[in-house]
Every structure is written in C-alpha cells, then in structure tokens.
Amino acid sequence: MVFSLIGIALIAMALALILPPLRHSQHLIIANSTSEANVMVYRRQLEEMATSVRHQLMTDEQFQRDRDELERRLIGDLPAEPPVSRTARREPGALVLGYALMVGLPVMAVVLYLLLGMPSLALQLP
C-alpha cells in the first residue's frame, strides 16, 4: 500500500513538472526565420543592457555606444525585403502531447512494473 502511494506521488510530481509548459505553449516565442531569430537576440541583448544601466553596472555613455553598435549590427542582419505578416495560432499538438503523457505515463509505469517487477512482494506484509 505504501509503495503504491509513493508511486502515485512520484507520477503526480512528474506530471506537475511536465504538463504546465505544454499547456502554456503560446508563451513560447518561436522564430520562423534566421532574421526573426536575430531580432530576438538583439532585443534580449538590449534588455540586458538596459538592466545593466538600471543596476548601475554600465554608464549611460556606454549604454548609448553599445546600443548604437547593436543597431548597426541589426541593420546589417536584416533582409532588404519586408517581412511577411503571419497570424498567431495555437497548435493543438502540445495539448495532445500533454494529455497523452498524463494518461500514458502512469499506464506505462504500471505495465513495466507488472512485466519487470515483483507485484507479489507488494502484497506481502512485512
């Protein structure tokens, strides 16, 4: 009985760690091209530089110099043609995977235990 409760608790903890990122996949930012990925990297660098200025790890002059250099690199990396607009859509694949894990993980654990383990020992009292 104790073994079963420990197993259920471990499966619940595993699902608690796996399912939330899969349910909130719309928060993930995915680049469709290298130019989009570069823009995201430059934005992240600019945010880090602004944080450094707020925490007084960088002076305003250093920030302005680094920002100008970052802008020059960004202009060099951007393509000449305008980007094609796309609509944001949520793909159901992550949610389906989450439900499959929620059902499949415990079922596979029980099946593997029945095949490889010794279920008769769990029924014996110490």
Image (cartoon, rainbow, N blue to C red):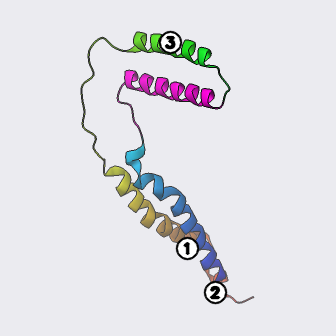
Amino acid type of the residue tagged 2 in the rendering = Leu
Mark closest to the chain's N terminus, 3 or 2:
3
When the figure is inspected, residue 12 is found, relative to residue 34, above or below; the finding is below
Label 1 residue SS:
helix
**Do the CB atoms of the residues marked 2 and 1 lie less than 8 Å apart?**
no
Q: Measured from the top left, where is residue 74 in percent x and y?
A: 44, 15
When the figure is inspected, residue 88 is found, relative to residue 79, above or below; the finding is below
Res 68 label? 3
Q: Label 3 vs label 2: CA separation?
A: 71 Å
Q: Label 1 vs label 3: CA separation?
A: 64 Å
Label 3 residue SS:
helix
Which picture quadrant has residue 60? top right
Res 123 label? 2
Residue at 39% from the left image edge and 62% from the top image edge: 99
Residue at 42% from the left image edge and 23% from the top image edge: 39
Amino acid type of the residue tagged 1 in the rendering = Leu
Q: Label 2 vs label 1: CA separation?
A: 13 Å
Q: Quadrant of the C terminus?
A: bottom right
Q: Looking at the magenta stretch, what is its main secondary structure?
A: helix
Which residues lie in the magenta part?
Answer: 29-55
Mark 1, residue position: 114
Q: Quadrant of the N terminus?
A: bottom right
Residue at 52% from the left image edge and 29% from the top image edge: 47
When the figure is inspected, residue 78 is found, relative to residue 25, above or below; the finding is above
Q: Nearer the viewer, mark 3 or mark 2?
A: 3
Res 98 label? none
